[in-house]
Amino acid sequence: MSNQLQLINPPELGRHSGYSQGVRTQAGPMLFISGQVGWDEQSRIVSADFGEQFAKALSNMLAVVRAAGGQPESVVRLTIYVINRMEYIGSLKKVGEAYRQQMGKHYPAMTLIEVKGLVEDGAKLEIEATAAL
C-alpha cells in the first residue's frame, strides 16, 4: 500500500474483517468512479449468478482505476449496492474469492447498501468507488 494511505481502525470499534473503518490520504488527485455493474463490453450482464456479477463489476471498477493510472491499492472507498442482502450473504464465499483475487489483502472503507432496484435490467449489484492516485 502506498505510504500516502493510512488505514484507520480504532481499537474501540472492534476488529472487523474485510474492510477498514476509515482511510486517510495524503495523495493529490482523487478519482470518483461511477457505479459499475457486472456487464461486458456490449453492455450485457455476464451471468445471473451473484458471485460472477460481483467479480465482473469489481473488474470493471478496477479497469477505471487502472485507466487513470492507479492500482487496486489506490481504492480508498467502496460502496456496494445490492438488491438482495440475503443473496449477497449467501454468495460470500464467491464474493470473497473474487475480491481477494482482484484486490489482494487491501481493504478500503466499505459500505453495503440494500436497494429496491438498479437501473440496469438483470443487475444484482453495483459497485461505486473512490481512489486516491
Image: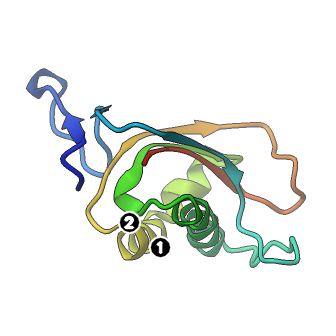
Q: Is residue 103 left or right of residue 129?
A: left
Residue located farthest toward the top when viewing the structure as drawn: 12
Q: Which residue is mark 1?
A: 94
- Disc 1 residue type (three-letter): Lys
Q: Total of numbered circles in the picture?
A: 2
Gap in angstroms between the C-alphas marked 1 and 2 = 14 Å
* Crowd band around label 2 with a 10 angstrom C-alpha radius: few (<14), some (14–19), many (20+): some
Q: Is residue 99 above or below residue 81?
A: below
| Percent coordinates x, y for residue 51 in the rendering | 57, 71
Q: In the rendered image, which quarter contains the N terminus?
A: bottom left
At a point 47% along the width and 73% down the height, the residue shown is 94
| Percent coordinates x, y for residue 100 in the rendering | 35, 70
Q: Is residue 28 left or right of residue 52?
A: left
Label drawn at residue 119: none
Q: Mark 1 vs mark 2: which is more N-terminal?
A: 1
Label drawn at residue 103: 2
